[in-house]
Amino acid sequence: MSMTRTAALRTVAPERAPATHRTAHGERATIADITAGLLAPQAATSPKYLYDSLGSRLFEAICELPEYYPTRTEASIFARHGADIARRVGTGSTLIDLGAGNCAKAASLFPLLQPKQYVPIDISREFLNEAVGRLQQRFPHIAMMALALDLAGHFALPAGVEAQRRVFFYPGSSIGNFAPHEAIAFLRRVRENASHDGGLLIGVDLIKDAAVLDSAYDDAIGVTAAFNLNMLRHLNYLLGADFDVRQWQHVAFFNAEESRVEMHLEARTSLTVQWQGGERHFARGDRIHTEDSYKYTRESFADLLAQAGFTADGNWTDDAGWFAVMHARAASA
Ligand code: AVJ
């Protein structure tokens, strides 16, 4: 299951780059970041580029697929253990939603958690603003403050965010996009931003049968394939690139040694991609690594929380043990 295939590559100085009708819409730093990934020996891109507005909608569709168990399994855990979870978390908190998307998960917990303030954070500003606008109408008594932030970097919360009782909410196993050492660094930053009386409520996808994982990330009707392939359309927009989506195919599988599901885009034919500032040849079968989704055991994740300075304080799972919701406190025991 070796992923290291090296594509022949050639960089083109910008002044020699072929004239293109496309315009790059990404910021300079974004273009440089993506270019570095595309030109690396094993081409790779950050999974954050999966989420343009169509990508966010395709991810919502993934969550409705029968094969994609995380969303509904997590929801069933909240439905069954909500009261118990709320007792641990407490009411009247400032609920800070990391990677809020359509805000539906947090909203479904409002009746139980009764937060004083809700602070949804997401990378996609448009998507977030739409969702929060609707939500504020449904819950006029909860103060809301939407933040468009990329959580991959250092983040500091603005003054409008209540300083007391900060509870970070990170559902959906999004933590799985980080490699374990990155997850620890990220959770340390979260802990630094939490108040001494604050905590973390997090969804964690658990290691299970490879066939279940494989089909969750490669569903029968191809929604996940569309989600992955849509990244190429987004890259065309951001870089002014000329990816022909039809020349690529979706590949996803559980890599047991690394304890992660990997997503790749594989060239179906020999091809060359050009963009503002670069080009690369891909042989048939060469891949761009687009996402990792790490899987844990409850024990291995509790260990990771401890390394980030959190104190584990309750966890809940479904009968099959496919998914876990874990609570941790910022204060040391
Ligand atoms: C949003 C990162 C939790 O890893 O399961 C779903 C993204 N990728 N299908 C996941 C995803 C392919 C998802 N997360």
Image (tube, rainbow, N blue to C red):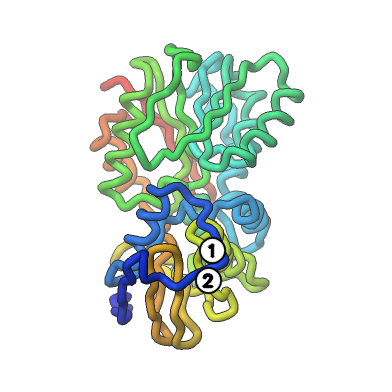
Front position in the image: 234 or 251? 234
- 159 displayed left or right of 298: right
Mark 2 highlights which residue?
A: 242
Which percent across, then down, holds residue 54? 65, 55
Q: Is residue 321 above or below residue 232?
A: above
- 286 displayed left or right of 40: right
Residue drawn at (40%, 20%) of the image: 198
Which percent across, then down, holds residue 192? 31, 25
Front position in the image: 71 or 162? 162
Looking at the image, tell me whether mark 2 or mark 1 is earlier in sequence order: 1
Front position in the image: 85 or 138? 138
Whether label 1 lies within 8 Å of ligand 1 gets the answer no
The amino acid on which the numbered mark 1 sits, given as a three-letter code, is Asn
**Spatial CA span between label 2 and label 1:** 6 Å
Which percent across, then down, holds residue 125? 58, 38
Residue drawn at (33%, 78%) of the image: 1
Residue drawn at (57%, 66%) of the image: 21
Q: Is residue 1 above or below residue 141?
A: below
Secondary structure beneath label 2:
loop
Q: Are marks 2 and 1 in contact (CB under 8 Å)?
A: yes
Mark 1 highlights which residue?
A: 236
Classify the position of the C terminus by image quarter: top left
The amino acid on which the numbered mark 2 sits, given as a three-letter code, is Asp
- 86 displayed left or right of 207: right
Secondary structure beneath label 1:
helix
Quarter location, residue 289:
bottom left
Q: Is residue 296 above or below residue 193?
A: below
Whether label 2 lies within 8 Å of ligand 1 gets the answer no
Q: Residues within 10 Å of mark 2 (few under 14, many from 20)?
A: some
**Label for residue 284?**
none
- Regarding residue 159, the answer to whether it shows in the image is yes
